[in-house]
């Protein structure tokens, strides 16, 4: 992540704060400018190219210009938003940044908002935003390793053989150390994390695609439709077919 932001050149910024309401869904097509967002309170998700990214008070999101994506507000809340134009943002998907010091990042954003609304000094605003971007991109090596592994999971979710050995190899760490990292930072095991991604992807496909249950099971890396249905029902407490029918009949 660090390399994505370290050479960025900001041209213009438009910071603001807004509220969101639980249950609201919105689709943004071909975003006109890049955007940075961090929830002050509450949780919302951003889904792009069948991948879902969570934004909350401890995880920031950067959205590239031209992106088409869906926002779903899981709770009531409020968020900082900074729309910006720039050079050298080499990204074609939404970027997710787990914050190592959320309080510091929130303080920097509050400073940015104060400079925008009260001092109206463009140079100070730009400096404050650069400080925010520097803070979120300075991820310790352990988190860069976890990012490598989790991104590999997302990009290869159709592979039914995402074993601990394979994932540890992607991060160039031992399997034992990888399990410790997942337990410490995600409070789950690598195996459960993979299953959660498979099921989250399946939920999206059940409501936003024309694939049948067998095709979704294969796409999400389940060894059979029966395996998929059992795992899905254990989590959601309804079958994939019931879930798809319920969600598709609910107004967005």
Image (spheres, rainbow, N blue to C red):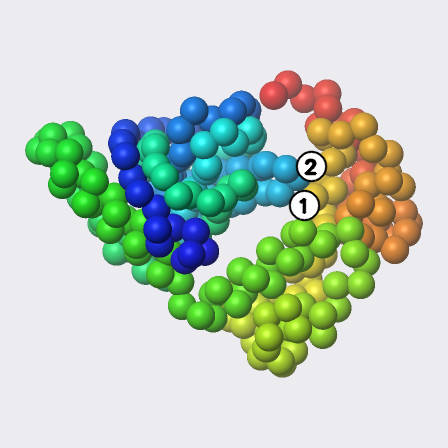
Classify 221 as above or below 212: below
Q: Residue at x 49, y 44 (%)?
A: 91
Image x and y of residue 21, in percent: 44, 28
Alpha carbons under labels 1 and 2: distance apart = 7 Å
Image x and y of residue 37, in percent: 38, 39
| Displayed quadrant of residue 159 | bottom right
Q: Residues within 10 Å of mark 1 (few under 14, many from 20)?
A: some
Q: Residue at x 58, y 37 (%)?
A: 47
Classify 206 as above or below 95: above
Relative horizontal placement of residue 70, taking residue 162 as reference (left or right): left
Nearer the observer, 175 or 206: 175
Q: Residue at x 55, y 29 (%)?
A: 68
* For the residues bearing labels 1 and 2, Cβ distance under 8 angstroms: yes
Q: Secondary structure at mark 2?
A: helix
Query: Mark 2 sits on what residue?
Result: 204
Relative horizontal placement of residue 233, taking residue 28 as reference (left or right): right
Query: Mark 1 sits on what residue?
Result: 200
Image x and y of residue 234, in percent: 77, 51
Relative horizontal placement of residue 88, taking residue 191 as reference (left or right): left
Classify 226 as above or below 124: below
Nearer the observer, 125 or 74: 125
Image x and y of residue 224, in percent: 90, 51
Q: Of the numbered discs in the image, which one, if any, rests on residue 98? A: none
Q: Quadrant of the C terminus?
A: top right
């Amino acid at each position: 992540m660090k390399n994505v932001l370290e050479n960025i050149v900001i041209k213009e910024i438009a910071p603001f704060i807004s509220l969101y309401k639980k249950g609201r869904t919105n689709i943004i097509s071909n975003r006109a400018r890049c955007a940075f967002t961090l929830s002050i309170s509450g949780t919302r998700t951003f889904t792009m190219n069948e991948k879902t990214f969570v934004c909350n008070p401890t995880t920031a999101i950067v959205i590239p210009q031209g992106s088409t994506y869906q926002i779903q507000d899981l709770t009531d809340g409020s968020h900082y938003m900074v729309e910006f134009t720039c050079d050298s943002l080499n990204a074609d998907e939404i970027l997710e940044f787990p914050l190592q010091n959320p309080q510091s990042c929130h303080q920097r954003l509050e400073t940015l908002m104060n400079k925008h609304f009260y001092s109206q000094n463009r140079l100070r605003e730009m400096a404050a935003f650069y400080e925010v971007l520097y803070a979120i991109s300075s991820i310790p090596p352990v988190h860069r390793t976890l990012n490598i592994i989790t991104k590999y999971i997302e990009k290869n979710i159709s592979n039914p053989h995402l074993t601990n050995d394979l994932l540890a190899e992607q991060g160039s760490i031992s399997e034992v150390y990888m399990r410790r990292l997942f337990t410490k930072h995600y409070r789950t095991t690598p195996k459960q994390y993979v299953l959660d991604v498979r099921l989250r992807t399946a939920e999206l496909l059940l409501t936003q695609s024309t694939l049948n249950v067998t095709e979704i099971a294969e796409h999400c890396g389940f060894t059979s439709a029966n395996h998929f249905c059992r795992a899905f029902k254990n989590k959601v407490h309804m079958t994939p077919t019931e879930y798809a029918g319920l969600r598709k009949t609910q107004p967005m």
